Image (tube, helix red, strand yellow):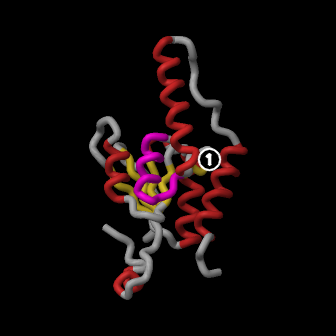
């Protein structure tokens, strides 16, 4: 199902509206709440993809898609659906790399905006850390999610939603 907003413009040859895709299985609830408010304010279709049932507020701009359980099933669905110019919210660096290759944008829930330049570096660092953890040389994971992460995310999201849009 697709949002009707912009369909007339698409038929007239205008650029399709952007959408937001959320890798929702591990997305913090506070980030989902920011996304819900932004979807309403900017009237942009926001789709949460997860392998579990998600609660979303009633809105023509917010939907959830439940996929089968399994490794990277939600990621594969997002990659299938994403269009150039869309935004994907994910902490999954391989997913971020894939959507950037497809001409979309990727934003980490901690507020890091991935780009062609930095996603390869982040992927290499992720693979190195994964290897070090598997040997027992490095233990632990990322720092706890905090208020600064939330603010950085909200700022990047707002910038994305307001760029190239009429006031």
Decide: is 18 above or below 110: below
Instruction: Let me know if residue 9 is in the magenta part.
Output: no
* Label 1 packing within 10 angstroms: few (<14), some (14-19), many (20+): some
List x then y, in percent, for residue 118.
Answer: 58, 45
User: Magenta segment, which residues?
Assistant: 93-106
Residue at the image point whose x is 59% and y is 64% from the top:
160
Identify residue for label 1. 112
Residue sitting farthest toward the right: 148
Q: Quadrant of the C terminus?
A: bottom right
Our reading of the magenta stretch's main secondary structure is helix
Q: SS class of the residue under badge 1? A: loop
Q: Name the foreground residue: 133 vs 39.
A: 133
List x then y, in percent, for residue 103.
Answer: 45, 59
Position of 8 with respect to 90 (left or right) is left
Decide: is 132 above or below 109: above
Residue at the image point whose x is 52% and y is 18% from the top:
132
Position of 67 with respect to 3 (left or right) is left
Residue at the image point whose x is 35% and y is 46% from the top:
74
Residue sitting farthest toward the top: 136
Position of 113 with respect to 124 (left or right) is right
Instruction: Let me know if residue 102 is in the magenta part.
Output: yes
> Hey, which quadrant is residue 157 in on the image?
bottom right
List x then y, in percent, for residue 152.
Answer: 68, 50
List x then y, in percent, for residue 61.
Answer: 46, 68
Residue sitting farthest toward the left: 68
Q: Quadrant of the N terminus?
A: bottom left
Decide: is 46 above or below 8: above
Q: Name the foreground residue: 66 vs 75.
A: 75
Residue at the image point whose x is 43% and y is 82% from the top:
14
Q: How many marks?
A: 1
């Amino acid at each position: 199902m697709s949002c009707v907003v912009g369909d007339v413009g698409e038929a007239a040859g205008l650029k399709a509206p952007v959408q937001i895709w959320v890798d929702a299985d591990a997305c913090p609830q506070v980030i989902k709440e920011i996304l819900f408010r932004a979807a309403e304010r900017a009237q942009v279709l926001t789709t949460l993809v997860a392998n579990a049932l998600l609660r979303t507020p009633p809105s023509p701009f917010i939907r959830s898609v439940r996929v089968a359980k399994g490794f990277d099933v939600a990621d594969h669905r997002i990659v299938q659906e994403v269009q150039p110019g869309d935004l994907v919210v994910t902490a999954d660096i391989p997913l971020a790399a894939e959507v950037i290759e497809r001409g979309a944008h990727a934003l980490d829930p901690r507020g890091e905006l991935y780009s062609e330049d930095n996603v390869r570096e982040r992927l290499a660092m992720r693979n190195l850390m994964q290897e070090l953890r598997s040997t027992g040389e490095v233990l632990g994971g990322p720092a706890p999610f905090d208020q600064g992460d939330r603010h950085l995310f909200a700022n990047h999201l707002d910038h994305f939603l307001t760029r190239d849009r009429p006031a």
